[in-house]
Every structure is written in C-alpha cells, then in structure tokens.
Amino acid sequence: MFLSDPPLTDELRTSFERAKAEDGYLANHTRLWAWRPDMDAAFLALRMRVISTTSLSERECALIVSAAVSTVRDSYCSLAWGTKLAGLIGDADAARVIKDRDPEALSPRERALARWVRKVVRDPNSTTRGDVDELRSAGLDDREIFEATLLAAYRLAFSTVNAALGAAPDIELVEAAPVDLRGAVDFGRTAPAR
C-alpha cells in the first residue's frame, strides 16, 4: 500500500485481532481502512442494509458486484467477489463473468443486470430509458433496478479507495480463489509474493 499503517491504538489492536480471528490473516484493505474504521463500518452497514432488504438474490448481488469490480479492473475485489460468485454459479462461469463474457449459466435477468452494471460503471451518463426498460423486460422492478445500481456504486467507491491507495490482493485471497478465476484476473494490482 502507498500509506503506512495508522498508529496502533488499543482499539485498533483489538480490531486487527478480531479480523485475524475471522479471516485467518490481516487483510490489506483492513489495514488501509484502519485510517477511518468508522467509514469502513459505515460502508459495510450500508451494503448490508441493501443486501438484507432487497429481493435481489444472493447470486444476483454477487454478480452485480463481480461485474462492477471487474469492469473497473479491480483485482482485489474481483478475486474476493469472483470467488463468492464461483460458489454460486461455478468456477468457470464466474471466470467468464470477470472476463466480461456472460456464460450460458446466467438467466436472461442476470445477463441484463450484468450489462446494466457494466454500463453504469463505464459511463453512467450513457444509460438510457431503453436500458431501464430492458431491465424491466427481464423481470426487474424499479426498486431492484435502484438497488442494483446502489450496490454497483457502493462497491465502485470502495474499490476506488483501495486501488488508488495501492491495496493489493492478499496472497491468502489469491490462493483461496479458484484456478479459473485466478487466470481471469489478469488486471489491476498483483498480490505480493510470499
């Protein structure tokens, strides 16, 4: 990372120990966001609030985030969320999503979501009423369209901070990712060697 670790207070030490206990290691993004743990917690709370109250499925949420982060070429979140998506649709199909190729395993609704998210991330001013109508035709209601856009935008903000400040994927994250997915994430920052 481009920033040093923040001063290690008792509160931060406890937070790091809790993160290590949960994940088995201290993630680079945890160290980075330790400069403002309140913002990290706020981001997580916002994302969890959307996910816990949406009618979008777990698979659709993982697809939305994976499509968003791979479009902005964020290797860290592509590995993390691509691994989650792989658990829901299979390793090879998750790798295809990361490579901007919609696999046959996706439903028409999921394909429409992936196209929408990629367009929103690439150029939000290029979206049209026709794009929204396509989502409606695929079975999404207006609340789901709004929530899908929120999830993509929230993740884009988080990814931007991580990437801009040099947070590279953790080697543990890379090693836990399916082989197909590791091959698909050939962009962004690379994990440090062991």
Image (spheres, rainbow, N blue to C red):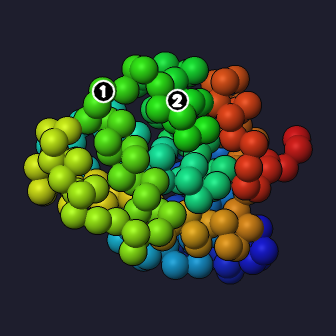
Residue type marked 1: Ser
Q: Residue at x 70, y 63 (%)?
A: 167
The 10 Å Cα crowd at callout 2, few under 14, some 14 to 19, many 20 or more, is many
List x then y, in percent, for residue 29.
Answer: 61, 61
List x then y, in percent, for residue 106.
Answer: 37, 26
List x then y, in percent, for residue 175.
Answer: 72, 31
According to the image, label 2 marks what residue?
94
Circle 1: element type: loop
Q: CA distance from mark 1 to mark 2?
A: 14 Å
Quadrant location of residue 176? top right
Q: Residue at x 84, y 49 (%)?
A: 192
Q: Residue at x 70, y 23 (%)?
A: 179
Q: Which mark is residue 107?
A: 1
Vertical side of 26 occupied by 81: above or below: above
Residue type marked 2: Ala
Residue 97 appears in the picture as rendered:
yes
Pick the front one: 186 or 44: 186
Q: Which mark is residue 140?
A: none
Residue 49 appears in the picture as rendered:
no
Q: Residue at x 59, y 59 (%)?
A: 72
